[in-house]
Structures are given as structure tokens and as C-alpha cells.
Amino acid sequence: MNLKVLFFGISTDLVGATSMVFSISPNTTILEFKTQLQEQYPQLTDINSYAIAVNESYARNETVLKENDIVAIIPPVSGG
């Protein structure tokens, strides 16, 4: 099953892309997706924490992903 993954902020630099298609198994949760993403892109573990949004709504670790969902990786933002 395929997802479209969008990267923002520092995550774009870490993976070298602003978006990609990412394949997962059916019934994959956000927590499982994060694990798979970090296995493929271990440099993402350098970000202390990041939010995940699915179809423009923040998602919890137990959210189950569906075919063609749009997943956004949103790293922490600081500034002043």
C-alpha cells in the first residue's frame, strides 16, 4: 500500500526530498510507520521529536494508515 509522505523543515534536508511515495503493509499504525521510516532514513532519529499529520490532521501513534493517505512529517519549530 502506498502513502504520499511530505517533509517539512529540517526533515527535508535529512532525507533529501520534500516528498516521496512510501510503501507500507495494510493496517500499519503511525508508530509502525515511524519505525519503518527511521529504518530507511536513520538520520531522522537526530530530530528529538516530530509531529505526524495524516490528511492535514495531527495523528496519534495508534492511528491506522490507509492507501493513498498523505502523511506530513513536521519537525519542531523554534524561532522568535
Image (tube, rainbow, N blue to C red):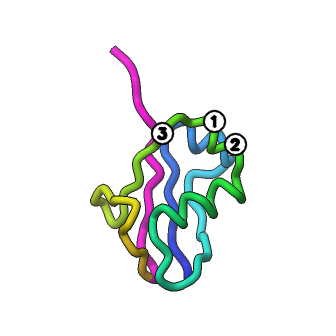
Mark 2 or 3 closer to N-term? 2
Residue picked out by circle 3: 49
Highlighted range, magenta: 67-80
Work out how far the residue at label 3 is from the one at label 1, CA to CA, in angstroms: 9 Å
Which residue occupies 68% across, 47% down? 16
Are dots 3 and 1 in contact, CB under 8 Å?
A: no
Q: Main secondary structure of the magenta part?
A: loop
Residue 65 belongs to the span the image colors magenta: no
Number of residues whose C-alpha sits closer than 10 Å to that of mark 3, classed few (under 14), some (14–19) or many (20 or more)? few
The type of residue carrying mark 3 is: Ser
* Quarter of the image with the N terminus in it: bottom right
Residue picked out by circle 1: 46
Q: Quadrant of residue 76?
A: top left
Number of residues whose C-alpha sits closer than 10 Å to that of mark 1, classed few (under 14), some (14–19) or many (20 or more)? few
The type of residue carrying mark 1 is: Asp
Are dots 2 and 1 in contact, CB under 8 Å?
A: yes
What x and y, as percent, mark residue 58? 30, 56
Residue picked out by circle 2: 43
Which residue occupies 63% across, 51% down? 17
Work out how far the residue at label 2 is from the one at label 3, CA to CA, in angstroms: 13 Å
Q: Which element carries disc 1, helix, strand or loop?
A: helix
Work out how far the residue at label 2 is from the one at label 1, CA to CA, in angstroms: 6 Å
What x and y, as percent, mark residue 53? 36, 57
